[in-house]
Amino acid sequence: MTTALRWFKSTYSDDEGGQCLEAAYTWTKSSYSSDQGGACLEVAATPHAIHIRDSKNPEAAPTLRLSPATWDEFTSSLK
C-alpha cells in the first residue's frame, strides 16, 4: 500500500504563484501489483469520487474517476 500523499496542483496554477490549490490523495495499490510490473492499478478514495490510475505510471494524473456508488456496484459485482 502506498502511504505517501501525492499532491496535484490546480489547473489554474502557474509558475508565478497566485491563489492556487493543491489536493492530495492517499493511493492504495492493487494486491495483484508487484515490483515486476503487470497490468495493475491504484485507487484513491475521496468523499465524492474514486480516482484510479495505472500503477506503472504513478506520476500521471488520475485517468479515471468514478462516483462512490458506481465503485460500490463495480466491486460488488466482482464478489
Image (spheres, grey):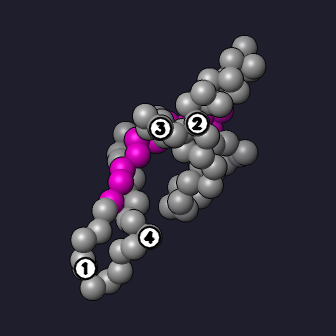
**Marks 3/2: CA–CA distance:** 6 Å
* Residue at which label 1 appears: 17
* Residue at which label 4 appears: 11
Residue 51 position by quadrant: top right
In this view, 58 is above or below 31: below
Circles 1 and 3: CB atoms closer than 8 Å: no
| For residue 68, side relative to residue 39 (left or right) | left
- Going by the numbered disc 2, the residue's amino acid type is Ser
**Marks 4/1: CA–CA distance:** 12 Å
* Crowding at mark 3 (Cα within 10 Å: few <14, some 14-19, many 20+): few
The x and y percentages for residue 4 are: 35, 46
* Residue at which label 2 appears: 67
Q: Where the C terminus falls, by quadrant?
A: top right
Magenta segment range? 22-33
SS at circle 2: loop
**Marks 4/2: CA–CA distance:** 21 Å
SS at circle 1: loop
| Residue 65 at least partly seen | yes
| For residue 52, side relative to residue 73 (left or right) | left
